[in-house]
Amino acid sequence: MLYVADMSPVTIDFTLPPELEASEPPEVRGLRRDDVRLMVSHYDDDRIEHHTFHELDHVLQRGDVLIINTSGTLNAALAAIHPDGHMMRLHLSTQLDRTQQRWVVEVRQLREKSTDPFFEAVAGQVYRLPDGATAELLTPYAAPENGKTRLWLTQLDWNGTSFDTYLSEHGSPIRYSYVERAYGSEYYQTVFANEMGSAEMPSAGRAFTPELVTRLVARGIQFAPILLHTGVASLEADERPYSEYYRVSPETADLINAARRANRRIIAVGTTSARAIETVADKAGFVQAGEDWTELVITPERGVFVVDGILTGFHEPRASHLDMLAAIAGHQHINLTYRTALQERYLWHEFGDLHLILP
């Protein structure tokens, strides 16, 4: 059956059929990571091409710069016990201090195969975690969605255990209902990860393999590393992005600026990379090194100053990430590509296929 999106010129909305939600890693389906499909679309003339990801070295041009996120994915999901004794889940989202004890978290209730947001939590509740650890809800974080608090500023007590050790022993990767069973943390790391801190995988980089990276370097493609620790995804409520920690090194800033002067293409690998680099950009498209918290929301009204293209997965209907894609390529082009993705039966989510948007 063919599903065609109902998309207006200014609103990217559509029905995503369940069978297009990737429910398991490609490796489990007998594929290599770089065997996922790759749609390549050109917003200058609306051309669309269909590839597999391992052909990326033949798609890109010598001199292209790929901005990559080096953040690693935490085992950010923890079993928790509500004060009334019910089993729950706690999703760590954003670390707010260097002691690893004050976090933004999401409380979730158990369902048959997954979890849903729990909107009945209240300030002052203490949730028991494995091995004597606790989580005390202090105050709602940011404005509640539709009067419902989803994210909480929370005090964690790891009961004398180091944070890294605790999550290694008791945590697991965050997953949602479309992933029907649990997979180990190795399925949630990209080849670029070298500093742990993301609640969820910067998944646009997942399909890269060491062999593909080697071929890209040999072809003259450059890699510009940044760091942005992602928070929990906004799958259920279409929330706007909230603050995330980023770091852009002087070396990366110099590389990006040299590419801009040479009129070479700058391509973000993922919305996280785009958010970080655009945070430190001026309106001429030049960047400076920086380390801070970003609250930048990239919309068509704001536009982009640095990135010429983006490699990304396929996003939920009405997701804020679609605004970023429209800022790069325009609503008309993104509508066209999402219609095509549905017609060609590309797979969505972190274990799915990828979309490379170029001029």
Image (cartoon, rainbow, N blue to C red):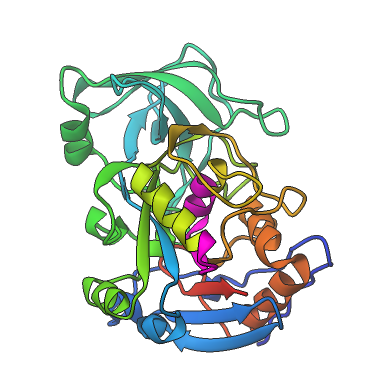
Assess whether residue 270 is covered by the magenta stretch: yes
Query: How far across and how far down the image is residue 127, in percent?
Result: 37, 21
**The N terminus, quarter of image:** bottom right
Relative to the observer, which residue lies in front, 156 or 315? 315
Describe residue 328's horizontal placement relative to residue 300 as left or right.
left
Query: How far across and how far down the image is residue 35, in percent?
Result: 35, 82
Relative to the observer, which residue lies in front, 208 or 107? 208
In this rendering, the answer to whether 11 lies above or below 287 is below
Q: What residue appears at the point 70 percent right and 62 percent down from the top-left corner?
A: 326
Query: How far across and how far down the image is residue 331, in percent?
Result: 76, 66
Q: Which residues are magenta?
A: 261-277
Relative to the observer, which residue lies in front, 94 or 283? 283
Q: Does the rendering let one see residue 225?
A: yes
Residue 98: image quadrant is top left
Assess whether residue 60 is covered by the magenta stretch: no
Q: What residue appears at the point 23 percent right and 58 percent down from the top-left corner?
A: 186
- Please, which residue is most extreme toward the right here? 9
Describe residue 161's horizontal placement relative to residue 265 as left or right.
left
- Please, which residue is most extreme toward the top here? 124
